[in-house]
Image: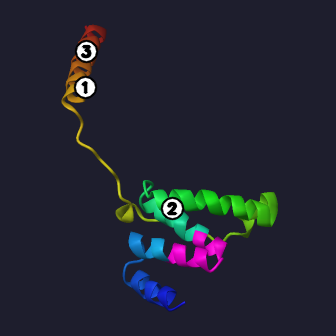
């Protein structure tokens, strides 16, 4: 329980910090507070969709909530906060050389088609 208090303090300073949210979700789950755990895991996934622990836990908790509360289980959840775009981690990889060449070739084709339509 003390862990959750410290995590709340960390989240007061940085409301959408991934690590404290994930730790609080795990603590809630271990205390069998599944609705609160679910909300925190879903918030983590809004920040970074690639967190495998959150994906697995949401799946596991969803099964338990369906068994426990029936088909209307979502209506009994607390609101899931919307994570601002500034807190979301967007994974952008540099495009490969082949992709850049294909984009350039397509742009040239489109220029040619546009000139033919205008002429």
Whether residue 39 is situated above or below residue 60 in the rendered picture: below
Q: What is the residue that sits farthest to the right in this orientation? A: 70
Measured as percent of width and height from the top left, residue 82 is found at 51, 65
Q: Pick the residue in front: 97 or 81.
A: 97
The numbered mark, 3 or 1, whose residue comes first in the sequence reads 1
Q: Quadrant of residue 79?
A: bottom right
For disc 3, the marked residue is: 109
Q: Is residue 43 visible?
A: yes
Q: Horizontal placement of 77 versus 26: left or right?
A: right
For disc 2, the marked residue is: 54
Separation (CA) of disc 2 from disc 3 = 44 Å
Measured as percent of width and height from the top left, residue 11 is found at 42, 81
Can residue 84 be found in the magenta stretch?
no
| C-beta proximity under 8 Å, tags 1 and 2 | no
Q: Horizontal placement of 87 versus 2: left or right?
A: left
For disc 1, the marked residue is: 103
The numbered mark, 1 or 2, whose residue comes first in the sequence reads 2
Residue displayed at 24% across by 22% down: 102
């Amino acid at each position: 329980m003390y862990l959750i208090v410290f995590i709340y303090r960390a989240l007061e300073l940085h409301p959408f910090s991934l690590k404290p949210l994930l730790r609080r979700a795990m603590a809630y789950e271990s205390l069998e507070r599944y609705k609160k755990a679910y909300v925190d895991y879903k918030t983590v996934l809004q920040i970074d969709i690639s967190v495998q622990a959150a994906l697995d836990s949401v799946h596991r908790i969803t099964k338990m909530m369906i068994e426990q509360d029936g088909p209307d289980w979502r209506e009994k959840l607390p609101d899931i906060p919307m994570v601002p775009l500034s807190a979301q981690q967007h994974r952008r990889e540099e495009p490969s050389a082949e992709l850049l060449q294909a984009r350039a070739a397509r742009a040239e084709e489109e220029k040619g088609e546009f000139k033919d339509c205008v002429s």
